[in-house]
Amino acid sequence: MHSLLFLDPGHFHAALTLRVPQARAADEVFVYAHEGAELRDFLALVERFNRRSPNPTRWRPVVTTADDPLGRLVEERRGDVVVLAGRNGGKARTIRRLHESGFHVLADKPWLVEPADLEHVRASLEGWPLAAEIMTGRHDVAAGLLKRLVGVPALFGAFRDDGPAIEQESVHHLEKLVDGAPLRRPWWYFDVRVQGSGPVDIPTHLVDQAQWLVDGDTATPALLSARAWSTQVPVEAFRRITGEEGFPRELQPFVDGDALSYRCNAELVYRIGRVTASAATRWNLSPSPGGGDASHSVAHGTRADVRLEQSARTDHRRRVFLEPRTDAGGVARALRETLTAWQAELPGVEVVPAGPETFEVTVPPPLDGGHETHFARVLDEFLRIVDAHRWPSALAERTLAKYTLLAQAAARTSAEDAMPRRPSAAASQSVRATSAAPAMKSVAAMIRAAVAGARRRWAR
């Protein structure tokens, strides 16, 4: 039985690991934190899980507030597993200190905010005790279905080599609901020196998914291009999201007039072995009425393209589509035969027509409870690895390979965002134009241009 320790739980992902009871962990959990709104929000969300009907949890948080929560946690050693989800600046050093102090660490992404963090990431992955990410994507049923379809040669063929074989786009929102209630973000979430800039944040998920699709856990991705741009956050929106009266002085270098320039968007093009992949992520202020986060992942094969999409077109549900590129009849037959063979593992998965030579592979809702349920599954998997005491070499190697890529992306874009400064009026207009560009021009088109540029460099 493990005792869980939570260190400065400033992000709601920390609480989501406790969304359901955990048989491998004691109900009494120990929280070490600075006093403040972030701690209160964490405790309030855990209490909602305890009071939920049906299926309430029974967590009993024991809280210690201190000026040095990390020092107190290490000194008192009231548990063996530390869950870390909050400020990302300095996180790599914190993980390393916990690791070298003998604690297992389950830490939210990103671990790396600046290229210099890579040495701490590498040290934390060299051996026991275990350090691993809160990485939910491989627990998503639809993502797993995409992975399985790509792995069937009669359906997918092989990855194409005439452009990006994997294209991933995602749109997130700074205002959102969690467990049915409005999410309050801490003010520091908007400081890229603390939270991390676009190239090192959401791409941690997207690169992990690409590694999974190509079975490239141990292959080191090679960066071809990277860029970052800003979302403008008006002060009124900042007040709604954070509860603060205005922009704190720490954010003033990023403020121009009544808006904050939040450099949270990114576009990366890279290769894993012979497969070219692209990842683009964008943050908007608020979803449209009835809307939510959106994502679009396509694996391009020689026989078919397989697409996982969540958008207004899919009623904001994650849905999987297959589009034959050749021998449509043969691909369709192979798809039906494949799904029949999968029924024991994926009961109720079916194929239905979804347009001219397009098929949808439907996933029954009971198979997946949604994104918020995945965090507890990550905790359970982590504790199982600890209990088995078999070093997960593939997990450690792919994590290091991914962060090596992201460190390169951070270095490549750091000339623009490493030193915050108040922009001039002309520069401010340029930033706003850059921020608006994704809305006026598809991210896919920009990625194709980046790949074309990379190919010209290869030719030289």
Image (cartoon, helix red, strand yellow):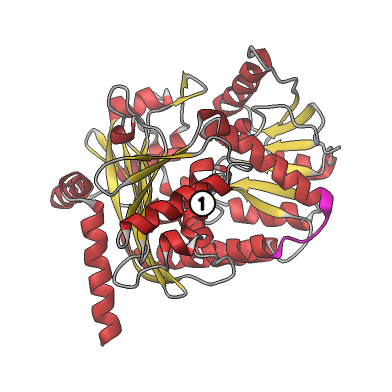
- State left or right for residue 235 relative to residue 176: left
- State left or right for residue 180 relative to residue 128: left
Label 1 environment density (alpha carbons within 10 Å; few <14, some 14–19, many ≥20): some
Considering depth in this image, is 99 or 267 the residue closer to the camera?
Answer: 267
Q: Residue 325: horizontal and vertical position, in percent?
A: 30, 60
Q: Residue at x 57, y 52 (%)?
A: 90
Considering depth in this image, is 79 or 58 the residue closer to the camera?
Answer: 58
Q: Is residue 6 above or below residue 197?
A: above
Q: Is residue 446 above or below residue 349?
A: below
Q: Is residue 287 above or below residue 148?
A: above
Q: Does the magenta-highlighted stretch encompass residue 4?
A: no
> Which residue in the protein does label 1 denote?
338
In the rendered image, the quadrant that contains the C terminus is bottom left
* Element on which disc 1 rests: helix
Q: Residue 109: horizontal and vertical position, in percent?
A: 54, 48
Amino acid bearing label 1: Thr
Q: Is residue 379 above or below residue 326?
A: above
Q: Does the magenta-highlighted stretch encompass residue 391?
A: yes
Q: Residue at x 39, y 27 (%)?
A: 241
Considering depth in this image, is 411 or 399 the residue closer to the camera?
Answer: 399
Q: Residue at x 77, y 43 (%)?
A: 81
**Is residue 120 visible in this depiction of the protein?**
no
Q: Residue at x 66, y 52 (%)?
A: 132
Given the current orientation, which residue lies at the most extreme bottom position?
A: 460
Considering depth in this image, is 335 or 161 the residue closer to the camera?
Answer: 335
Residue interval drawn in magenta: 387-393
Where residue 35 sits, quadrant-wise, is top right
